[in-house]
Image (cartoon, rainbow, N blue to C red):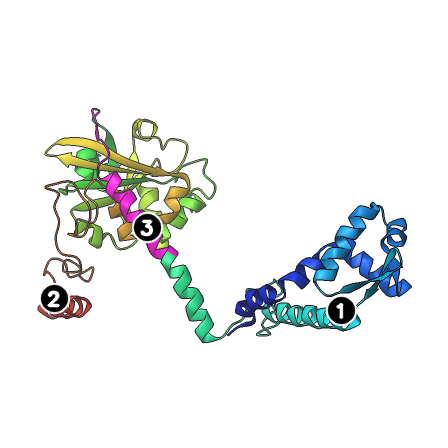
Amino acid sequence: MSPARRWPERIQRDATLWTAIADPTRRRLLDLLLTHRTATATMLARELPITRQAVVKHLSVLDRAGLVEGVRQGREVRYVVCTKQVDAATRSIAAVAAECDELVKTPQLTGELTMQTPPIVSAQDWKAARADLLVKEKQMTRARDALAAERRRMPWTAVEKDYRFEGPNGPVTLLDLFDGRRQLVVYRAFFEPGVAGWPENACVGCSFVADQVAHVAHLNARDTTLVFASRAPQNDIEGLKARKGWQMPWYTLTDEFDADFDVDEWHGTNAFIRDGDRIFRTYFIDSRGDEAMGSTWSYLDMTALGRQEQWEDSPEGYPQTPPYTWWNWHDAYEAGPSQAFLDQVARAQAGSG
């Protein structure tokens, strides 16, 4: 068992002692008694900025802890220090201090860890601490699932304007950006004159997001298209993508789309769904919410249909399939999942059930 786990037992066992010496006034009384060898409450009160009655109360606490003893001499009570108990208290303090030193010891790995690190514990205690934290992590996961379920019940708002963009092959509409799929996610990236880094680079933060975007084939497999949009001309966008190795579709804004969807002054991610040719805005994430974007799951969780898996809490009639079975390599979705993979999933689910 680690020192960190022994502390409560030690402190509980010596609770009266720790309470007695925790107060600075009582520690001062012990110093005075050690100096005078013996003294009355009246004598001690003369050397402290408190009343005699207060001194008596403090001495009573020290008496119960066994640190002092009152001996009646006539009408007076003279107090003396119980040196054996004081020695025991000193040893107890030293033991806890040693444990504190051990817990805050900086591991000597490279000599560069100058900050105060967490405790260094055994592998068994580390696993126990991780198990404790895992409870909270699972609670957070369930809360995230519940939030995504609420998103799937958010009202939609119809998109009434005919927004236009410029793509690598010429002019396109917002409907064209869906590329035939049911859902669309649009990230407004700042790449245009006036943005730091132009024309060699896009906005630093937007580039950070672009660097962490997963392969779009996985989103496409859930009937969802991800695109980026900026005000830069297409030739600049294509050059940027080639330099950075980015693969996502990236379009040029040509009208008030950014202003109408809250991304004219700051980055943000909008989600849309279509019913035939009718388009609806379903959700919007910006500011620190964009920090978590980039993974397939983060994009699907913000959409109206979600991950479309059977375990999700979705409204009646939403498309859902068994989990895992739709997964594939990013370049193999057209062929569908292999039978070997489906068998592997079946074995894993049978084992966990």
Residue occupied by mark 3: 294
Q: Quadrant of the C terminus?
A: bottom left
Q: Residues within 10 Å of mark 1 (few under 14, many from 20)?
A: some
Q: Badges 1 and 2: C-beta atoms under 8 Å apart?
A: no
Q: Position of residue 295 (x, y in %)?
A: 30, 53
Q: Amino acid at mark 1?
A: Val
Residue occupied by mark 1: 86
Nearer to me, 87 or 182: 87
Residue occupied by mark 2: 342
The residue shown at (27%, 51%) is 297
Magenta span of residues: 136-161
Q: Can residue 123 be seen here?
A: yes
Q: Badges 3 and 1: C-beta atoms under 8 Å apart?
A: no
- Disc marking residue 226: none
Nearer to me, 220 or 158: 158
Q: Amino acid at mark 2?
A: Leu
Q: Is residue 127 left or right of residue 111?
A: left
Q: Is residue 344 left or right of residue 78?
A: left
